[in-house]
Image (cartoon, grey):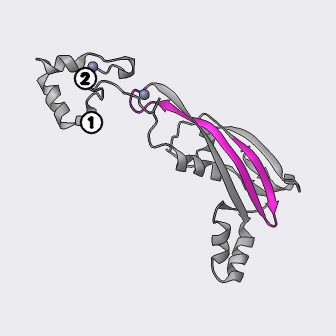
Amino acid sequence: MNALVISLISVGRKGLAVDVAVPGPDLALEDGLELGLGEVRVRGSLDAIDTEYLFRGHITGAYAGPCDRCLTECAAPFDYEVAWLFEEAEARREVAGAAGGDDVEIDAADDDRMFVFEGNELNLAVPVWEELVLQAPSKHLCRDDCRGLCAHCGADLNQGPCGCKRRNNGDGNKGLSSLADLFPDLRPSSPEE
Ligand SMILES: [Zn+2]
Ligand SMILES: [Zn+2]
């Protein structure tokens, strides 16, 4: 049973307060897309506006997993402010037909993200998942200036210099240092003293 499925009968005149926490993996609507989510909390209020429903609130949680650079397990917390408009599928078709175009849809969807529901239920899991996928950071880092691992010895450079650089400048491994010339991005980023 999905806790994010809201029965519209429970939405009163003053709206419905929503505060639901779901395990991240339960939200995944697409197979194979792993966001490394822990618990995701959805808080806000759902209000009826004529035949439509407006949800305004926050999605909070954290993306978790190994840092892209140093592989340390870390979590990147998020707090997204959201506003979604839900329109009944049948009403939407009628309005679009009567207006003879899509003017109506465009001005309603200007600021709010728009979704469609059918029957007496509305599923918040769809926009929640969409939001999380859209906003997922392209890089998962333990901190913005993570120094990553030494390309030669694998030492975590956040703990301090590993000493490889000095050795490689001497009679160290020529093969590896010429490889480093081909991939300058992989060089340790600390400036030479
Ligand atoms: Zn890191
Ligand atoms: Zn090293």
| Picture residue at 69% right of the left edge, 74% below the top | 93
Q: Residues within 10 Å of mark 2 (few under 14, many from 20)?
A: some
In the rendered image, which quarter is residue 111 located in?
A: bottom right
Task: Report the residue marked by disc 2.
Answer: 152
* Along the line of sight, the residue nearer the viewer: 172 or 9: 172
Looking at the picture, how far across and down is residue 51, in whole percent? 80, 66
Which comes before the other along the chain, label 1 or label 2? 2
Asked whether, in this view, residue 58 is left or right of residue 184, the answer is: right
* The magenta segment: 42-71
- Where residue 148 sits in the image (x, y, percent)? 36, 27
Camera-side residue: 22 or 46?
46
Which residue extends farthest front?
A: 193
Q: Main secondary structure of the magenta part?
A: strand
Residue 180: name its quadrant.
Answer: top left
Where disc 2 sits, the SS reads loop
| 92 lies left or right of 187 | right
For the question of whether residue 31 can be seen, the reply is yes
Tell me, yes or no, whether the highlighted magenta stretch contains residue 52: yes
